[in-house]
Image (cartoon, grey):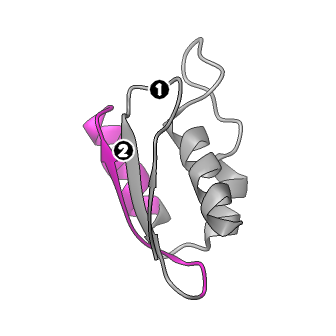
């Protein structure tokens, strides 16, 4: 199933991702944000279990911000798993 998430407090404007029937991440795309970092995150999470990835990325901050693109992806995955 394909999902779209509008993150808050980060440079990325939208996260679009797909989970298979076993909640494995098939694909993820980031609109806006730091391309190199987000391509790296994409490569690391594809094929991973959505719950495990959400747990690993949760509460990562960016600079002085209280959140980050990884933290926002964690929130997006948790929302999709509800």
Q: Position of residue 27 (x, y in %)?
A: 37, 69
Q: Quadrant of residue 44?
A: bottom left
Which residue corresponds to the image point at 67% horizontal and 67% vertical from the top-left? 81
**Residue marked by disc 2:** 38
| Vertical order, 8 against 26 (above or below) | above
Q: Closer to the camera, 61 or 21?
A: 21
Image-based side of 79 in relation to 34, left or right: right
Can you name the residue that lies furthest to the bottom here? 21
Q: Position of residue 46 (x, y in %)?
A: 44, 69
| Vertical order, 22 against 48 (above or below) | below
Which residue corresponds to the image point at 36% horizontal and 44% vertical from the top-left? 38
Q: Quadrant of residue 29?
A: bottom left
For residue 62: magenta?
no
**Residue marked by disc 1:** 10
- Separation (CA) of disc 1 from disc 2: 12 Å
Label 1 Cα neighbours within 10 Å, binned few <14 / some 14-19 / many ≥20: some
Label 2 Cα neighbours within 10 Å, binned few <14 / some 14-19 / many ≥20: some
Residue 25 circle label: none
Where does the C terminus fall, quadrant-wise?
bottom right
| Vertical order, 33 against 9 (above or below) | below
Marks 1,2: beta carbons within 8 A: no
Q: Closer to the camera, 62 or 29?
A: 29
The residue stretch that appears in magenta: 22-44
Quick one: SS at disc 1?
loop
| Vertical order, 65 against 13 (above or below) | above
Which residue corresponds to the image point at 37% horizontal and 50% vertical from the top-left? 40
Quick one: SS at disc 2?
helix
In primary-sequence order, the first of circles 1 and 2 is: 1
């Amino acid at each position: 199933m394909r999902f779209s998430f509008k993150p808050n407090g980060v440079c990325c404007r939208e996260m679009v991702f797909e989970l298979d029937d076993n909640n494995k991440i098939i694909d993820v795309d980031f609109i806006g944000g730091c391309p190199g970092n987000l391509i790296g995150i994409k490569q690391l999470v594809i094929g991973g279990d959505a719950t495990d990835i959400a747990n690993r990325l949760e509460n990562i901050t960016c600079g002085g911000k209280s959140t980050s693109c990884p933290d926002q992806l964690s929130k997006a995955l948790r929302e999709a798993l509800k």
